[in-house]
């Protein structure tokens, strides 16, 4: 058992667990976005950054940093809240998040985080890059304008479904998730139509066809429910 | 024994300026004078002053010729080789035929580059003749812990950018549990304009391979990779030749020097994305995945290539190792400053007389680097700043010229050692535009994985674009500092963490230049197109009418033959057509 402190409360973790696991077990809330139970952590969104007092105040992603003996972790502070707000602002400014017109309005992790962290306005100029919407799939659609590039769809499809349909293409601000090396999703030969990516997606980027504004609810916990039932290797 | 030896540089720069043709011309001339048995031509790696290429060095007396053309071969052979009279017009500086008389060379200290430009990199015998592979032979008789102790004692720090203590890294990999361990040489060298690692690989590939083998012995690895960018075909070829030769002599492969130590090395080619030089992205790329960094810890020392403990060092780091083993850790540590030991190779570029590859002891001042070795800024212009550390480095002003070049002093002032790119800037440089240029590079090269870097670089770039267009506000300066600070702390990898450096350092040392762009809508250096005014210098104008004809808006006005012309600022759209058109240089840009 590993012993550490998070926000001045004693916390415990098993070897192999992360700071986030330890925080959850100890009842300390840390905001997350790219992380999803059952998927490999990637540390991409940086919303779960925590400060390690005994590493000179270094910031590390709680979701992807192994818990270590003796760590003195600050999970919530004014500095961290303001940093998290800035990151959310950057996400809102990066593409197009006009919630009133979004299938996920009211059921969106990005929106919830903004509410939780008190991000009530965006001080950056909106980029509005006018990206494509691909509705070629029989059951689902993807609107890149709502995508935050968290990669949850990529990992759900690869790690849980084993189909490896989604991947990242391009780099920097031009990065897009794409199906089968750039083909339209509807023509994908690898997609089984299981819908795991859609359930994993935190925003309105991936949606079920037929859902209109504010109707798209997701079941991100589905993946953990599936993997927990699997026999362990 | 040959009477004369010609060392002909065949580094990438000299090859592209025609060293091959010079070689053929020399051979033809030697043949027709029946001198082939008396004069030997050795093709070497980079000698340093690449812009003066093709260069060659004639021994025994050591005459250094620059900008040699194939047509010069006849005179070199008939005058110098036959009559013993050096060809004066081909000397670098009149009256200083020998490198040791030229400050560019004499102020340097060559350790890593010792063989670059003096041996034929494609002949392992020449490397061995300089003591090559002796260090490896010695190391395999030692306990790995002794090897690590020596590297620690030497104070060697990683030359790939971050300056992590090399011995400590080796110790961590040695201590990591696991039977399979790897050694990787990072030869991605993505900084634009940097070519230190390329020169080492081209000029002395065995030194890198030997350093890797010593490291592998120390950490307990049996397989190594050199990750080299595909745009370095000559370095790749020389590595391939070197690997084949080393294997043939049993210096790589099974049971090296009849010990129990076996080690071999493979090459892996990178496609040239800057981020693929970041160690975790590099390993992802070797594994065949998208070249994207991942959070550390866990560090490669415990979870590296294919999840195994992995040692990754830079080309120059490895090239230092044999000198530590042979010369002793104490001798190595005698050079440099308290916390930065040994030498560092730099690529000097920009507005400086002598550009090229130089190696200097750590702790030398920027002034010595730029003025003594670099020869200072060419006549007519003044030194303004030096950008050190590549696109993620910082800009230091003239007032900091006495800063010692070492890891800690540079980072204290907001720059970094980086991999060794040094760009000298003169007073015609706009610092805001320069910062914008570097940020454009990093924004382009951001892998896009983490939000602070992916979006932060774009937001900073948008602000800088506004400022150089004359649309900035005072609030923008606050914003730049805020975003920069956020990126430094929150980005996943050092690309995003260091990308703000050029902006933050210019904000720190040249705030008045930013303010001029914002408050006066003026670019003091006369660079930013929207913020300059075009004027005709009356004394220089001949009334040729070229500017008036070129101007699309009628801003350039005058009557042919009646100098001077004038430019009506209110009509000018700052396209620069008049400036380009004037055959007498009478149109000038000045700050608005
Ligand atoms: C964006 C980025 C690019 C990098 N490029 C290089 C490179 O081209 N060569 C290199 O040796 N290290 C590069 N590094 C540093 C490596 O991650 C790593 O620190 C280094 O290879 C370790 O070797 P050293 O300890 O010998 O310096 C880069 C780091 C970043 C963040
Ligand atoms: S994805 Fe979420 S944040 Fe974006 S528009 Fe839809 S509801 Fe709003
Ligand atoms: S529906 Fe299933 S198989 Fe198809 S892309 Fe989504 S996760 Fe992959
Ligand atoms: S589509 Fe959804 S799950 Fe996939 S990267 Fe975008 S936001 Fe994340
Ligand atoms: S800092 Fe930039 S380059 Fe590094 S992981 Fe983040 S997006 Fe990629
Ligand atoms: S949730 Fe940890 S970085 Fe995204
Ligand atoms: S390549 Fe010839 S001097 Fe550098």
Image: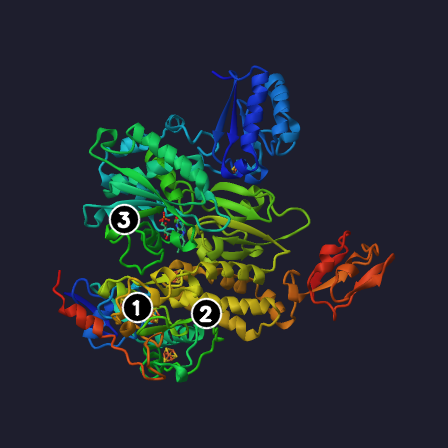
Query: Residue at position x 40%, y 26% from top?
Result: B126
Residue occupied by mark 1: A153
Gap in angstroms between the C-alphas marked 1 and 2: 29 Å
Same subunit: marks 1 and 3: no
Dot 1 falls on a residue whose secondary structure is helix
Q: As rendered, which of B219 and B400 lies closer to the eye?
A: B219
Q: Secondary structure at mark 3?
A: strand
Which numbered disc covers residue B470?
Answer: none
Disc 1 and disc 3 in contact, CB within 8 angstroms: no
Circles 2 and 3 on the same chain:
yes
Under 8 Å from ligand 4: the CB of mark 1? yes
**Viewer-nearest of labels 1 and 2?**
1
Answer with left or right where residue A66 lies relative to residue B53: left
Q: Chain of mark 2?
A: B
Is residue B355 among the parts visible in the rendering? yes
Q: Which residue is mark 3?
A: B310
Pointer 2 residue: B483
Residue A178 lies, with reference to residue B235, above or below; the image says below
For the residues carrying marks 1 and 3, which lies nearer the camera in this image? Answer: 1
User: Splitting the image into 4 quarters, where does residue B475 fall?
Assistant: bottom right
At x 24%, y 46%, the residue is: B181
Quadrant showing the C terminus of chain B: bottom right
Name the secondary structure under disc 2.
Answer: helix
Query: To which quarter of the image does residue A22 belong?
Result: bottom left
Asked if marks 1 and 2 touch (Cβ < 8 Å), the reply is: no
């Amino acid at each position: 058992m590993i012993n550490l402190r998070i926000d001045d409360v004693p916390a415990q973790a098993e070897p192999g667990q992360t700071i986030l696991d330890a925080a959850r077990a100890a009842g300390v809330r840390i905001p997350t976005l790219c992380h999803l139970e059952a998927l490999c952590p990637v540390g991409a969104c940086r919303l779960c950054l925590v400060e390690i007092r005994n590493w000179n105040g270094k910031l590390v992603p709680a979701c992807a940093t192994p818990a270590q003996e003796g760590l003195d972790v600050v999970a919530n502070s004014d500095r961290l809240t303001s940093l998290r707000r800035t990151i959310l602002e950057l996400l809102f400014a990066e593409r197009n998040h006009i919630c009133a017109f979004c299938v996920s309005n009211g059921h969106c992790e990005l929106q919830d985080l903004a509410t939780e962290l008190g991000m009530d306005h965006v001080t950056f100029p909106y980029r509005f890059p006018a990206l494509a919407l691909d509705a070629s799939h029989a059951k689902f659609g993807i609107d890149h304008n709502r995508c935050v590039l968290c990669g949850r769809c990529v990992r759900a499809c690869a790690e849980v479904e084993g189909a490896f349909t989604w991947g990242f293409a391009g780099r920097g601000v031009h990065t897009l998730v794409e199906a089968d090396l750039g083909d339209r999703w509807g023509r994908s030969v690898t997609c089984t139509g299981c819908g795991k990516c859609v359930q994993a997606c935190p925003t309105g980027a991936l949606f079920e066809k037929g859902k209109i504004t504010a109707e798209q609810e997701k079941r991100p916990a589905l993946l953990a429910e599936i993997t927990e039932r699997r026999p362990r290797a | 024994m040959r009477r004369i030896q010609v060392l002909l540089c065949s580094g990438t720069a000299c090859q592209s300026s025609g060293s091959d043709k010079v070689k053929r011309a020399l051979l033809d001339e030697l043949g027709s004078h029946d001198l082939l048995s008396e004069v030997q031509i050795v093709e070497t790696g980079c000698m340093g002053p690449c812009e003066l290429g093709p260069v060659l060095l004639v021994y025994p007396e050591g005459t250094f010729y620059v900008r040699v053309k194939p047509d010069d071969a006849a005179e070199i052979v008939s005058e110098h080789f036959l009559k013993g009279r050096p060809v004066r017009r081909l000397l670098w500086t009149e009256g200083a035929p020998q490198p040791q008389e030229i400050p560019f060379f004499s102020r340097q200290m060559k350790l890593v580059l010792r063989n670059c430009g003096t041996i034929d990199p494609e002949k392992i015998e020449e490397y061995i003749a300089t003591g090559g592979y002796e260090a490896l032979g010695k190391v395999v008789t030692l306990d790995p812990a002794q090897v690590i102790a020596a590297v620690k004692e030497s104070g060697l720090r990683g030359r790939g950018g971050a300056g992590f203590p090399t011995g400590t890294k080796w110790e961590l990999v040695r201590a990591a549990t696991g039977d399979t361990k790897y050694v990787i040489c990072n030869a991605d060298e993505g900084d634009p304009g940097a070519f230190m690692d390329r020169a080492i690989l081209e000029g002395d590939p065995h030194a890198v391979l030997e350093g890797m083998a010593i490291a592998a012995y120390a950490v307990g690895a049996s397989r190594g990779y050199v990750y080299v960018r595909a745009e370095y075909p000559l370095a790749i070829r020389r590595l391939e030749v070197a690997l084949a030769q080393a294997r043939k002599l049993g210096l790589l492969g099974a049971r090296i020097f009849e010990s129990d130590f076996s080690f071999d090395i493979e090459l892996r080619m990178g496609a040239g994305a800057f981020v693929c030089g970041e160690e975790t992205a590099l390993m992802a790329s070797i594994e065949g995945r998208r070249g994207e960094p991942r959070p550390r810890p866990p560090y490669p020392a415990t979870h590296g290539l294919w999840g195994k403990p992995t040692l990754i060092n830079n080309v120059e780091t490895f090239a230092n190792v044999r000198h530590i083993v042979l010369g002793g850790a104490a001798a190595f540590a005698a050079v440099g400053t308290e916390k930065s030991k040994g030498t560092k190779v730099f690529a000097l570029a920009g507005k400086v007389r002598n550009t090229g590859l130089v190696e200097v002891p750590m702790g030398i001042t920027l002034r010595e680097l730029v003025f003594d070795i670099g020869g200072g800024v060419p006549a007519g212009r003044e030194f303004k700043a030096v950008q050190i550390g590549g696109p993620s480095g910082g800009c230091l002003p003239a007032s900091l010229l006495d800063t010692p070049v070492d890891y800690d002093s540079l980072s204290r002032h907001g720059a970094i050692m980086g991999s060794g790119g040094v760009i000298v800037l003169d007073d015609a440089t706009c610092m805001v535009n320069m910062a914008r240029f570097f940020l454009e590079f990093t924004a382009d090269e951001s892998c896009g994985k983490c939000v602070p870097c992916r979006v932060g670089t774009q937001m900073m770039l948008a602000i800088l674009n506004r400022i150089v267009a004359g649309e900035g506000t005072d609030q923008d300066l606050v914003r730049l500092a805020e975003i920069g600070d956020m990126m430094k702390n929150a980005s996943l990898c050092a690309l995003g963490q260091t990308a703000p450096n050029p902006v933050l350092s210019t904000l720190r040392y040249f705030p008045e230049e930013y303010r001029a762009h914002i408050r006066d809508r003026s670019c003091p250096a006369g660079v930013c197109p929207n913020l300059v005014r075009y004027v005709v210098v009356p004394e220089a104008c001949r009334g040729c009418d070229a500017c008036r004809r070129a101007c699309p808006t009628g801003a350039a006005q005058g009557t042919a033959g009646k100098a001077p012309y004038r430019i009506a600022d209110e009509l000018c759209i700052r396209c620069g057509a008049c400036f380009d058109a004037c055959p007498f240089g009478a149109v000038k840009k000045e700050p608005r």
